[in-house]
Image (tube, grey):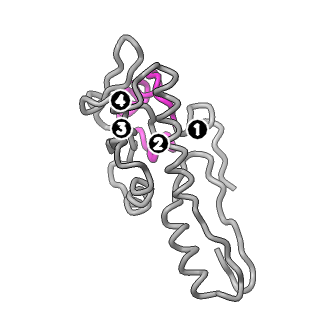
Amino acid sequence: MVEQDRIYQIELNTISASLAGLSSKLAQFQRKRFPEMNIPLNKASISIGKSFEQAISLYKQEYNLEASASIGILFVIQETERNVYDQIHLQETINSNIPIVRKGLRDPSCFEVDLEGRLICDSLEIGLVYYRAGYSPTEYETPSFWTSREVLESSRAIKCPDIASHLAGLKK
């Protein structure tokens, strides 16, 4: 964020990789508004998208899956999502061959873990669970939210963030 003649980092978020899309756009606007300040390019959303692609690739390697196997990413979203445009921007940076599913935690029947630990959602094996919901206990309105989280955590899918990081979350 630019204020007068200084550049500030206003948040360090260890819970989710969020606001990358919007902050990238904001940096573009600020570069035009303050050309004299030499504001650096912000490629956060591209970096996160590439990291997600790499996570899927590593998941396939770990479980000896064909490179062409259809393994998806699950965006766990809030029931009344307010930050959808940032998420869409991030989705657009991810290889279009990787399917993306968006689900909330309200209905645990959306998620299934098979005997091998594979997470299945909408008939798709999920290799990466990207949490954009479930930040605080207040988001778990009923026991079904907790059940969904338990099912997701019991799977072999990579979690972003993992439960240890989520519990130790820091906002500065």
Check if mark 3's residue and mark 1's residue have beta carbons within 8 Å.
no
- In this orientation, which residue lies closer to the viewer: 119 or 70? 70
Depth-wise, is mark 4 or mark 1 nearer the camera? 4
Residue 143 seen in the figure: no
Q: Earlier in the sequence, mark 4 or mark 3?
A: 4
- Whether residue 167 is in magenta: the answer is no
Query: In the image, what residue type sits under mark 1?
Result: His
Q: Which mark is residue 131?
A: 2
Q: Which residues are magenta?
A: 130-159
Residue identified by numbered label 4: 69
Label 4 or label 3, whichever lies nearer to me, is 4
- Kindly report the distance in space between the C-alpha atoms of the residues bearing marks 4 and 3: 26 Å
Is disc 2 surrounded by few (<14), some (14 to 19) or many (20+) residues within 10 Å? many
Specify the amino acid type for callout 4: Ala
Compare marks 4 and 1 and give the one earlier in the sequence. 4
Q: Residues within 10 Å of mark 1 (few under 14, many from 20)?
A: some
> Which residue bears the numbered disc 1?
166
Please state which amino acid type lies under the numbered disc 3.
Leu
Q: Is residue 10 above or below residue 101?
A: below
Is any part of residue 83 visible from this angle?
A: yes
Q: Report which residue position mark 3 lands on.
A: 105
Q: Position of residue 125 (x, y in %)?
A: 34, 28
